[in-house]
Image (tube, grey):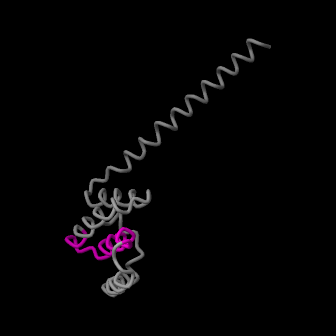
Amino acid sequence: MGTKFFKRLLQTTGIFIVLLSCAVLVGPLLRLLRRHSPDPLTRLLELADEKAWLNDWIEAAPLYQKVEELCIQRRNQSCALYARVSQIPARSETASISTQILQLSKDLTLQPLATIGRDFAYSV
């Protein structure tokens, strides 16, 4: 029983290590592949969104500002609005809430509400 048990344990441990290694290596590889969009605006937007998801709004705000400028150049209003609104959490420490609400209200009247909810990240 001793050698068969240890042989089986070693085999099971080896399989576990191989599977764990695959999981550890595949995750970053998929992330790297997903990140390389051919469009620089999309890459910048993904980077800004990642920083925002990591609650690093101060670092994300200038990226969103650049995204907003690029979206305006491309005449993509929904993208520009998304980037502008995404800057609010970073500015909330220094700007008054009433000013931000007023600006957002003006922004929402610029285009039909039906187009705001679209997932524009892939059509930027």
Question: Farthest front residue?
Answer: 94
| Residue 84 included in the magenta stretch of the image | yes
The residue closer to the viewer here, 55 or 19, is: 55
- Quadrant housing residue 9: top right
Residue 21 horizontal side relative to residue 63, left or right: right
Residue 82 place in picture, x, y as percent: 35, 72
Q: Residue at x 34, y 71 (%)?
A: 91
Give above or below for 60 relative to 25. below
Question: Farthest left residue?
Answer: 73
Question: Farthest top residue?
Answer: 3
Range drawn in magenta? 71-93
Q: Residue at x 40, y 82 (%)?
A: 114
Give above or below for 7 relative to 12. above
Q: How many marks?
A: 0
- Quadrant housing residue 46: bottom left
Q: Residue at x 25, y 57 (%)?
A: 40
The residue closer to the viewer here, 107 or 36, is: 107
Residue 53 horizontal side relative to residue 121, left or right: right
Q: Main secondary structure of the magenta part?
A: helix
Question: Farthest right residue?
Answer: 1
| Residue 43 included in the magenta stretch of the image | no
Give above or below for 111 relative to 35. below
The C terminus sits in image quarter = bottom left
Residue 29 place in picture, x, y as percent: 41, 41
- Quadrant housing residue 52: bottom left
Q: Residue at x 22, y 67 (%)?
A: 70
The N terminus sits in image quarter = top right
